[in-house]
Amino acid sequence: MPGGDVREMARGVTAELEQLPHLPELPGRGPGADMIGRGAGLLTELFVQTEPSGWRFTDHPGRDTKRARSWLGEDLDALEEYTQGYEGLLKIQAVGPWTLAGSIELKHGEKALSDPGACRDIAESLTEGLRRHLEDVRRRVPGAAVVLQLDEPLLPAVLAGSVKTASGFQRLRAIDRQLAEQALRDVIRGVNTPVLVHSCAPEVPIPLLRRAGVAGISLDFGLLTQRHDDDLGEAIEGGTLILAGVVPSTDAAAVQSEALSDPAGSVHGVRTLWRRLGLAPELLGRRVVVTPTCGLAGASPAYARRALAAAVRAARSLADNPE
């Protein structure tokens, strides 16, 4: 989410998203509030610091790790304040193990993704950190049924071997798909809560994520083609929740879209897919959640609120008029 006032954003999120509020992330505050720094702050027994090239592992917790944990604590305080007495679904999000491995450098300077041992350590450390994080959330919001979203924007690139080395001149070798699947499966089993995976990149590996045990997959619907029909159809029929990114995530993108002025029209592509796959219309209200195409950090605070409201209206349209 945009801006720097977490209390204001938590108030807005809980007001607009009555059915599925979430813990806001405000990366605009600086290092440690960004996706990678925040995720690294959840790791146990692994510590990071900022370098000119980005995030890098270090031997001891320094001010960057402490800042990341401090930001998260403030955000949880704000969420707790605005969810007093709340009962229902609550979404918590964190960066996934493969995006962390492809973004943080080892102490010698290359990305952790280049080292299989480091990748295992990240996944194990993240799992333990997420367990503790989820316990804290449940203590603060005891009426919540917590859902965890793992953000994996780099996962398709990790599988394709297109993640750049730290120097930027070469590409890291592709990670074996079975290894990638197993690491995600271990994290999902280890946190003992329903897990969604979000990736707004092209070529999201839907079958791999299903085999890993995800409850839902969040993707940018504008990047889908008919090549993805079979994978999507099997996922939907198998009970996987689809979080359909159809609302533009920035003010500039919204100028070229009618999603805000015509929420029902924004989910036309979802209805078209449903008819093409021959799926029962009544499944739309049970299998699809309408979302922005990606995070809203690049939008203005005013637009972010409007985008969330538009997603809610579009979802109601799908449920009320599935055909």
Image: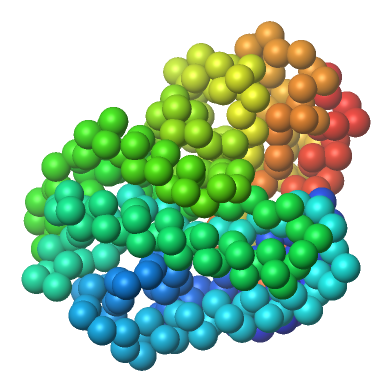
Residue at image location 63% in from the left, 12% down from the top:
277
Q: Is residue 200 above or below residue 270?
A: below
The image quadrant where one finds the N terminus is: bottom right
Whether residue 268 can be seen here: no
Q: How many marks?
A: 0
- 28 vs 251, nearest the viewer: 28
How is the rendered protein coloured? rainbow
The image quadrant where one finds the C terminus is: top right
Q: In x, y percent, where is residue 170?
A: 10, 51
Q: Is residue 206 above or below residue 174?
A: above
Q: In x, y percent, where is residue 65?
A: 38, 82
Q: Image check: 98 left or right of 213?
A: left
User: Quarter-wise, where is residue 127 in the image?
Assistant: bottom left
Residue at image location 22% in from the left, 78% down from the top:
58
Whether residue 89 can be seen here: yes
Q: In x, y percent, where is residue 141?
A: 75, 67
- 49 vs 267, nearest the viewer: 49
Residue furthest toward the bottom? 63
Residue at image location 56% in from the left, 16% down from the top:
234
Q: Is residue 143 above or below residue 223?
A: below
Q: In x, y percent, where is residue 154?
A: 35, 49
User: Quarter-wise, where is residue 246 in the image?
Assistant: top right
Residue furthest toward the top? 278
Residue at image location 70% in from the left, 33% down from the top:
288
Residue furthest toward the right? 320
- 279 vs 252, nearest the viewer: 279
- 198 vs 188, nearest the viewer: 188
